[in-house]
Image (cartoon, rainbow, N blue to C red):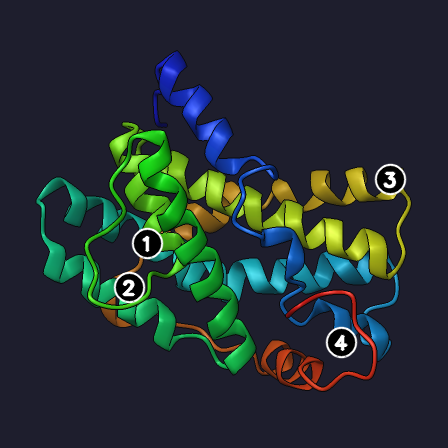
Amino acid sequence: MSTLTDPALLRLLQLASVSLPVGGFAYSQGLEYAIDSAWVSDGDAVADWLLLQLDHGLARTELAVIPRLHRACEQADTGTTAYWNDWLLACRETRELHLTDIAMGEALCRLLPSVGLQPPELAGPSAFATAFSAAAWQWQIPARSCALALAWSWLENQVAAATKLVPLGQTRAQQLLGEVQQHIPAAIEAAFGLDDDELGGSLPGLAMASALHETQYSRLFRS
């Protein structure tokens, strides 16, 4: 288990906070289309949707890359950082998912200097996980704790979207957070055990929902 100092724990909470101004609340990542099309219709279905993403999406992409990004930061290896950043962006299966990742990553990169941190050194746009990991490393937050914070941030934003779209009541939303978060430690454990050639995932339903969301007649979320 990771041991955090009090200052590092407070910084971790800051990184994971929904108030971090990166615009995560603006993106449903295909969930809005899935709900509008009745693929997802209640809290139980939302839980299934999110658990599939956690186990077959996040755990095989962002969460698995975080320890690699942390090692690259420790070694000041900008080439490896750029490689995994490009790899993450290449994993986005639709234009909207790609733009979401870049928009959130670049927003965090713009924020970092104002809190005394250096953004990752990249020739092109930053994926959100790349900037997130760079901030965590500079604040002496271990890779596993960084992964927990990233997963929590994703989960909180997705449940907030579902709360508006299904809609869910606040009590059911809290129950849903409690249900899904229990699976995060196991997902991180699996992610951290993957070799490079085991990384990568594909969720065709999510990709379809994201692509179709772009032309949805009426929508609350950008993606």
Please report whichever mark, 3 or 2, sits nearer to the chain's N-terminal start: 2
Where, quadrant-wise, is the N terminus in this rendering? top left
Residue 42: where, in percent of width, then height?
Answer: 88, 60
Indicate whether 174 appears above or below 30: above
Whether tag 1 and tag 3 are in contact, CB under 8 A, the answer is no
Question: Is any part of residue 193 visible from this angle?
Answer: no
Given contact means CB atoms under 8 Å apart, are the residues at marks 2 and 1 in contact? yes
Q: Label 2 is placed on what type of residue? A: Asn
Disc marking residue 170: 3
Amino acid found under the numbered disc labelled 3: Gln
Q: Quadrant of residue 11?
A: top left
Up the image or down, 74 lies above or below 48; here it is above
Q: Which residue is mark 1?
A: 130
Q: Secondary structure at mark 1?
A: helix
Measured in 3D between alpha carbons, the distance from the residue under mark 3 to the one under mark 2, in whole angstroms, is: 36 Å
Q: Secondary structure at mark 3?
A: helix
Element at badge 2? helix
- Dot 4 or dot 3, earlier in sequence: 4
Which numbered mark, 1 or 3, is in the foreground of this view?
1
Towards the viewer: 21 or 96: 21
Between discs 1 and 3, the one toward the N terminus:
1
Name which quarter of the figure residue 26 lies in: bottom right
Alpha carbon distance from label 4 to label 3: 21 Å
Sequence-wise, the earlier of marks 1 and 4 is 4
Q: Earlier in the sequence, mark 2 or mark 1?
A: 2
Q: Quick one: label 4, few (<14), some, or many (20+) residues within 10 Å?
A: many
158 left or right of 39?
left
What residue is disc 4 on?
33
